[in-house]
């Protein structure tokens, strides 16, 4: 099996052990399902490591694909993507676009 090596790998391997597991909270207003739940496709907003660890209790060995939006461990918490939501109304527009595309 190939092994991925990168600068800081040892620190990351240790760090993930100290981050606690979190529980996913479902926002029914953003769901297209009649009965929102953790089955099927999910869009999770949050810190990458926290979000991934929140999936372990319910989705271990069941996930087929994960898309993680940048930045990737840059240490720059204030960085804002050019595509970041700038107005509250944009969030609903993006949710509606996802509903139209995937539903």
Image (cartoon, rainbow, N blue to C red):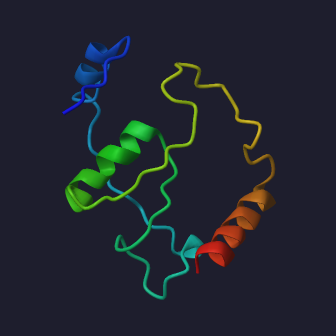
Quadrant of the drawing holding the C terminus = bottom right
Percent x, y for residue 66? 42, 51
Is residue 22 among what the camera can see?
Answer: no
Q: Which residue is rendered at x = 48% and y = 55% of the image?
A: 44
Percent x, y for residue 65? 40, 55
Horizontal arrangement in the rendering, residue 49 relative to residue 91 (left or right): left
Quadrant of the drawing holding the N terminus = top left
Is residue 67 among what the camera can see?
Answer: yes
Horizontal arrangement in the rendering, residue 37 relative to residue 78 (left or right): left
Q: Which residue is rendered at x = 50% and y = 44% of the image?
A: 68
Q: Nearer the viewer, residue 96 or 8?
A: 8
Horizontal arrangement in the rendering, residue 79 relative to residue 82 (left or right): left
Q: Which residue is rendered at x = 25% and y = 26% of the image?
A: 3
Percent x, y for residue 10? 26, 14
Q: Nearer the viewer, residue 22 or 63?
A: 63
Q: Is residue 50 above or below residue 54?
A: above
> Which quadrant of the view contains residue 9?
top left
Percent x, y for residue 89? 80, 61
């Amino acid at each position: 099996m190939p092994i991925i090596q990168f600068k800081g790998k040892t620190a990351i391997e240790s760090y993930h052990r100290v981050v606690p597991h979190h529980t996913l909270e479902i926002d029914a207003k953003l769901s297209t399902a009649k009965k929102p739940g953790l089955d099927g496709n999910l869009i999770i907003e949050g810190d990458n490591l926290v979000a991934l660890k929140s999936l372990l209790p319910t989705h271990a060995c069941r996930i087929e694909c994960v898309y993680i939006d940048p930045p990737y461990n840059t240490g720059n918490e204030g960085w804002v993507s050019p595509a970041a939501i700038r107005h509250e109304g944009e969030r609903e527009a993006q949710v509606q676009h996802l509903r139209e595309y995937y539903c």
